[in-house]
Structures are given as structure tokens and as C-alpha cells.
Amino acid sequence: MLRVLATALLVGVAGANQYNVLYPHYIAPAECAHGCAKWADVAGDGVKLNQSKVAALFANGTVPADAGASCLWPGMAVSHHEGRRRLADGKPKGKPTESSIPYCLCQSAPGSLTPPANETGQCTPPMSTPEQINLQYASADIVVAAFVTYEKGELSAPPQAMFGEEGKPTSVKQIKGISHYYSKTSLDPSSNTTITRHYTMSFVKFDGLKPGQRYSYKVKSGAAAAAWSATFTFRSARAAPATRLGIYGDMGVSPYNNMQNLLTDCQAGKIDVVAHMGDHCYDMQMEDDRKGDAYVGKH
């Protein structure tokens, strides 16, 4: 019986060992008064900001075709702060951060494609939208889908999932789960004001799984205006041959980690499950828990 904590690799764009992660549903940051600029359309060849510096932030040194003006986390930027540092000489504008909160380049004027030098902004996650989605093997025939949503308060309705065998619409069924609500009040050092974050951790159990069967699913929170996630797939534990594990630990935060290798092996069917040995993330509570959110969101 398989009793190892496993995480499905759900998002990413092929590239270096740490793939690029796009957050197209995130909201443009308040510090970008005119919205976000397109990553591939940065003009100029100056010292402080140019297209080559922007491209160097991404896996393979190329801005992804679907990046647009999205909020994202580039694979070659160790962190948001590192991304900002590499875009500018001297101290960048805005609050520096050690986490990898999705960010974008700010437009310098309405309709402009050129961001002002040194200016980026931290993007904001939308309410009631699933993120940090991962799968956990509870037993040979049970998988639990876990995810996080940001809410305005405690929810009265449970989270839900649409779940069934891949390619078999008649097998799809709606399942309810459980959730745990959290709130945290802290002092925002940038404005010296008290802020409270509200978020919900949800869990939905998929049981009665057939050995080695591929399943598809999507999830949403219990909020009235909740959005469904994208549809994902996974394969249940095999009866024979044995389920194949990719095991790693002590990864560190670096663009030269092993995430792209694991993703590639998952996509190729070389491994079924990724097992974390531990010692691969630290100080998750920093920045009012945003460091933990960013780490789980991109890995």
C-alpha cells in the first residue's frame, strides 16, 4: 500500500531546471497605475532596462509566447527581489521581497508597451479562485485533492470537485469535501497599517480508484461566486508494474533546481509520483505567509 505524500506537478512552461510559471488570472498590482506592460515588448537598449535583461529572467533566455502582460514568476529569477535586481542598476522601486510573489512590469502610460525603468509590482490573487492545487496519496485507492483560495470570510458551503475517469464523461460526478478557514492579522510595514488576510484550505477525497487508471478533475471553493479551476489529470497507483516514484530533497530556491526535470519525467510517464524527502523549503511564514504561498504555488 502506498503511503507516501505525493504532489502532482500542475503548472509550468518547459525551460531550464526551474520552469516559468504564469498567473494570467492574477490582478495587476496597485503600484502599476496603468496596468502591466507586455514582457516581450520592452523597448530600448539602455543600461537600466532592455529586452535582453528581461529575456534573461526566463527559462531558456526567451520570453514565453503566451506571457503577454501576465503576472508571472520567471524561471531564472531566484525570487521577486532577484528579478527586480536583475532588471535594474541600483535600488529598485517598491518594497523588496525575498519571496517569489508573481509580479509584472508596469506600463509607463495608458496604452504604452514600455514600462518605466526599475518599476515592477506584486500582483494580487483573485478571490475564491483555486491555487496551490496538489494531490496526496492517502492509500492505494484514495487520492486527496488539496487547494487554497483567498476568501472574504468563513464559508458556509463545502468545496466541490468534478471527478471521473479521463475520456469517460458519463463517469464524471460532483463530490463535496471539507475546508478549514484561517485569518491572520499583521502590520504592513510599507503602509504602517494593520491588514488581515482571509484564506481557506480545502480538501476533496477521490476514493474507490482503479489501479493505474487515469482520472480528470477540477475543483472550486464553497463561495457563492467561486470559480472552477482548470481541469487536471492524474494516474492512480499501479497494481503492476509498481508505481514509480521520483524522490528528492534539500532542493533550495534556485533557478538550477530539479523542478523541470521532474515535470518532464512526469509528462513522459517515467514517474507517477513525486515524493518530498524534506529540507527543501524554509521560513514559509515570512511576509505574512506570502513566502509559503509563493513557494507552493510555483512548485
Image (tube, rainbow, N blue to C red):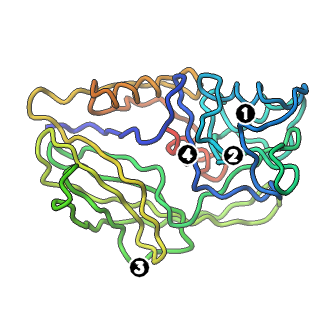
- Spatial CA distance of label 4 from label 2 is 16 Å
Residue matched to label 4: 292
Nearer to us: label 1 or label 3 = 1
Marks 1 & 3, CB-CB < 8 Å contact = no
Q: Name the residue under label 2.
A: 103
Q: In this view, does 74 lie to the left or right of 212?
A: right
CA distance for labels 3 and 2: 32 Å
Circle 1 sits in a helix, a strand or a loop, which is it?
helix
Reading the chain from its start, which is encountered first: label 1 or label 4? 1
Residue 198 at x, y percent in the picture: 57, 66
The vertical placement of 187 against 272, above or below, is: below
The amino acid at mark 4 is Gly
Do labels 4 and 3 touch, CB within 8 Å?
no
Task: Find residue 8 and report its horizontal and vertical position in percent.
Answer: 36, 40
Q: In which quarter of the image is residue 91?
A: top right
- Judged left or right of residue 162, residue 76 is right
Q: Name the residue under label 3.
A: 156
